[in-house]
Amino acid sequence: MRNAYHVEHVRAAEAALMARLPEGTLMQRAAAGLAATCARLLGGVYGRRVVLLVGSGDNGGDALYAGARLARRGARVDAILLNPERAHAGGLAALRAAGGRMTGDPAVIDAADLVVDGITGIGGQGGLRPGAAELAARAAGAQALVVAVDVPSGVDASTGVVEGPAVRADVTVTFGTYKPGLLVDPGASHAGVVELVDIGLGPYLPAEPTVAALQAGDVARLLPELSAETDKYRRGVVGVVAGSDRFPGAAVLTVGGALYGAAGYVRLAAPRRVIDLVLQRWPETVCSEARPGEAGRVQAWVVGPGMGTDEVARDRLAEVLASDVPVLVDADGLTLLGKYFGGRADRSAPTVLTPHAGECARLLGAERADVEARRLEHTRQLAERTGATVLLKGSTTLVADPAGAVRVNPTGTPWLGTAGTGDVLSGLIGSLLAAGLPALDAASVGAYLHGLAGRLAADDAPIAAHDVIDHLPAAWRSVGNDHGPVRDARPCL
Ligand SMILES: NC(=O)C1=CN([C@@H]2O[C@H](COP(=O)(O)OP(=O)(O)OC[C@H]3O[C@@H](n4cnc5c(N)ncnc54)[C@H](O)[C@@H]3O)[C@@H](O)[C@H]2O)[C@@H](O)CC1
Ligand SMILES: Nc1ncnc2c1ncn2[C@@H]1O[C@H](COP(=O)(O)OP(=O)(O)O)[C@@H](O)[C@H]1O
Ligand SMILES: [K+]
């Protein structure tokens, strides 16, 4: 698990740790890690040109001390101070003593090999102010690699919100712990590759992170183990209510995702034309034209993709919601939920909602652009209001449960932004629910595998939704391989 903490937790942990250490120790640890990464990126230090952008807080102090280390190893280091009277005094003295120079001339950025962004870190408020924004823009237009100190300046460390101009880094060297703003867009796309420098904060951080990102080993651990005596019913039956005469393909894709999830059996409740199409592609599907409640027992339902929003669809949704098994609601199901059910899912069993930003905005009565700008806040809000586990799709996929836990998905590719991939995702998560995974795990594990399958399928070229289905087995295997082939408990004969 990669854990990220809100700034208030980071500050509290830093204060507790600092109280036990000689003054300045943490900043030296941070600067040493930062300088080491810069040296590695430069491929050598002697004679390289490094420019420091230095704000008036401790973030600037880190940059100055790291600059001093690089200058001692022969780099030519120029520091541009945003507020010379308030720059970190110890850092300034160290840089001067190492032979670094202060300059007011931003043209040094154009000739730099590497620019260190020490304008603001966790103390930054709002977008960059004009003087800082000009320097950030100049660095973005130059050849130099840009390395952000702790957080790209202008990005809100706790949320990933970017209000106004902000630094775009190639690499962010962050200290002590990840911050949510480095993992959640739009902040995440300003951070580039994120490297964590351990400064000893671990024991002082709370057990529950603000946001967590599953890693391959976590996914392998959360996937159901297959025992030798298992069978299709023990693995779980997932029911799919998807497709309509107008959108039959949505059912094909949802069923495809469900077949390559963890369940052993996929039922489809849909109109005849949809069933015929699904059976052509997936003959293993057990289909019924009956209402969902009469289609046979399931351990979880997926309802919504392409089902339409008429009254027949509304009644099918109502029947599924009335069941006592986990239900995933997607697409048209979300529209119906907002229109007829007051956007709430008051049920005895868990409910998972999988909106994209537009659907989330509609359910919250917000603007789509605002949801995209403040993804964490809106995902949490929808989970609180609906009492459901909410997975917000898009450039960063977030999962929030009503108890307040939040996960961010580290896999995926923009190539997944193609029609029908959301249907595959809902089938896959429904299948994991049917296999018995709790809602938060099913949604975050499903997003992980889906994003990985998308990456494997795309390989830097366009993909269609069915390609994601085709690559789900490879995604499972690559996750399992992280821990060796442990998923099948039967020894190889
Ligand atoms: N506290 C600690 O124990 C440690 C802190 N460290 C560093 O200290 C940083 C936090 O330092 P600070 O609390 O001094 O805060 P920052 O240095 O992150 O930011 C505060 C400064 O930035 C200015 N500022 C705020 N918003 C701005 C904006 N939008 N545009 C331009 N300037 C803006 C403020 O006027 C203030 O001078 C961390 O991010 C990290 O880099 C590290 O040295 C590790 C140890
Ligand atoms: N820019 C992006 N980066 C990464 N993933 C994306 C991006 N845009 C969309 N996706 C993913 O693609 C899928 C699209 O789902 P959705 O919007 O429901 O489309 P559809 O309804 O056509 O299936 C989701 O898994 C979403 O997270
Ligand atoms: K910074």
Image: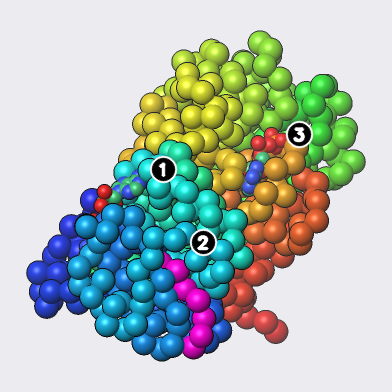
Q: Which residue is mark 1?
A: 130
Query: Which quadrant of the figure has residue 337?
Result: top right
Determine if residue 102 is in view: yes
State how far apart marks 2 and 3 are (Cα). Answer: 55 Å
What residue is drawn where x is 23% and y is 65%? Answer: 88
- Can you tell which of label 2 and label 3 is closer to the viewer? 2
Mark 2 vs mark 3: which is more N-terminal? Answer: 2
Under circle 3, the secondary element is helix
Q: Quadrant of the N terminus?
A: bottom left
Q: Amino acid at mark 2?
A: Ala
Asked if disc 3 is less than 8 Å from ligand 2, the answer is yes
Residues in magenta, as a range:
46-52
Under circle 1, the secondary element is helix
Determine if residue 349 is in view: no
Q: Amino acid at mark 3?
A: Ala
Q: Amino acid at mark 1?
A: Pro
| Image x and y of residue 26, in percent | 23, 73
Question: Which disc number belongs to residue 376?
Answer: none
| Image x and y of residue 264, in percent | 66, 52
| Image x and y of residue 441, in percent | 48, 51
Along the viewing direction, whichever of 371 and 243 lies nearer the viewer: 371
- Can you tell which of label 1 and label 2 is closer to the viewer? 2
- Can you tell which of label 3 and label 1 is closer to the viewer? 1
Along the viewing direction, whichever of 188 and 233 lies nearer the viewer: 188
**Magenta includes 20?**
no
Question: Which disc number belongs to residue 250?
Answer: 3
Mark 3 vs mark 1: which is more N-terminal? Answer: 1
Along the viewing direction, whichever of 230 and 323 lies nearer the viewer: 323
Where ligand 1 lies, by image quadrant? bottom left
What residue is drawn where x is 22% and y is 57%? Answer: 86
Mark 1 vs mark 2: which is more N-terminal? Answer: 2
Q: Which residue is mark 2?
A: 107
